[in-house]
Image: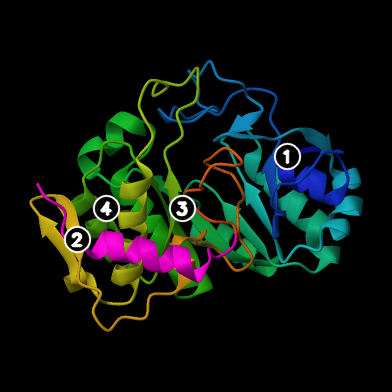
Amino acid sequence: MLVRVSYGTAIAVGLIRARLMARPTTAYLMTYWPGKCSNDCAFCAQARTSKANLDRLSRVTWPAFELEEVVKALPNGRFGRICIQTIDYPGMLDDVFALLEAFRPLKLPVSISITPVDSETLGRFKSLGVDYVGVGLDVASERLFKTLKPDFDWREMWDFTERIVDVLGSGRAFVHVIVGLGETDRELIETFERAYSTGADVSLFAFTPLKGTRLENLSPPSLERYRRIQLARWLVENGLVDRILLEGDEIVGFDLDNLNVPPSVFSTHGCPACNRPYYNERPRREPYNFPFPPKKGYLEEALTRLSSRRPR
């Protein structure tokens, strides 16, 4: 049986010899299928009509290795968890259960990002060491959702989120949101509010244009806008949505008086031990999601800039 391994993870465990710019603290793996996903998400390299390289997910390459070889190598990475990405194809769930059984002797907690499954399946996941599940909502705008994710239903994604919370507990569902797909700032904030009111958490990604996908010519979000959205997510999580200054559908500033905002606000926000290095950005550029918290000086400068009311 084959399993895909993110390029950084493969380096960290010794399956590939190359230099690491930032060490992943989670082992990122993906189910193997020689063809395309049965779904057709407009931004995804794995999509049914995509002409992109099928070794890609976002900007990361995922080479395939024999499962036995991967299981043997994983302890070399000193990881805090395993994260399994999935694409849809016949027999995908059988492959997921085979992976979970193979990883059990490693005694690492496991996260899975998967399309909607029923409560019984979630219970089986839990019995095999899964403690977090990622929900690929991706599109924070209901008005854009069906265009960009034609094989999915907006309501079903939220129902799935609720099922995860019911089975695994509060905070154990991570709603994945991609910034830069045409959504407004207000739509992002409303999606954050809905996720947290459901008992879920939110993990942010920056849109990455990939050649061969339907959105290959769409520009990624500016770093400034992404920083605003990261800060807005933190404020919503902490019940401080009133500190976000909106004009129309756009964030124009923040009221940060007497708030102790942590440096991690600009870091990867996901399951415990997740740092996802360079998933959305090229090395040597300032990352959208810092794999480790930035220095205090960076935080102070960024917060000063973000809290200043922007001219229309």
Where's residue 178, x and y in %?
39, 45
For image coordinates 87% across by 41% down, the residue present is 15
| 3 or 1: tag closer to the N-terminus | 1
Measure the C-alpha gap from mark 1 to mark 2.
Answer: 38 Å
Instruction: Please state if 170 lies on the left or on the right of 10 as rendered.
Output: left
Measure the C-alpha gap from mark 2 to mark 3.
Answer: 29 Å
Instruction: Identify the residue position indicated by label 4 in the image.
Output: 188
Q: Amino acid at mark 2?
A: Gly
Asked which secondary structure carries label 4, the reply is helix
> Which dot, 2 or 3, sits closer to the camera?
2
Q: Amino acid at mark 1?
A: Tyr
Q: Residues within 10 Å of mark 2 (few under 14, many from 20)?
A: many
Q: Amino acid at mark 4?
A: Leu
Instruction: Identify the residue position indicated by label 2 in the image.
Output: 253
Magenta-highlighted residues: 292-312
Where's residue 251, x and y in %?
19, 55
Vertical placement of residue 86 versus 203, above or below:
above
- Given residues 17 and 199, the one toward you in this image is 17
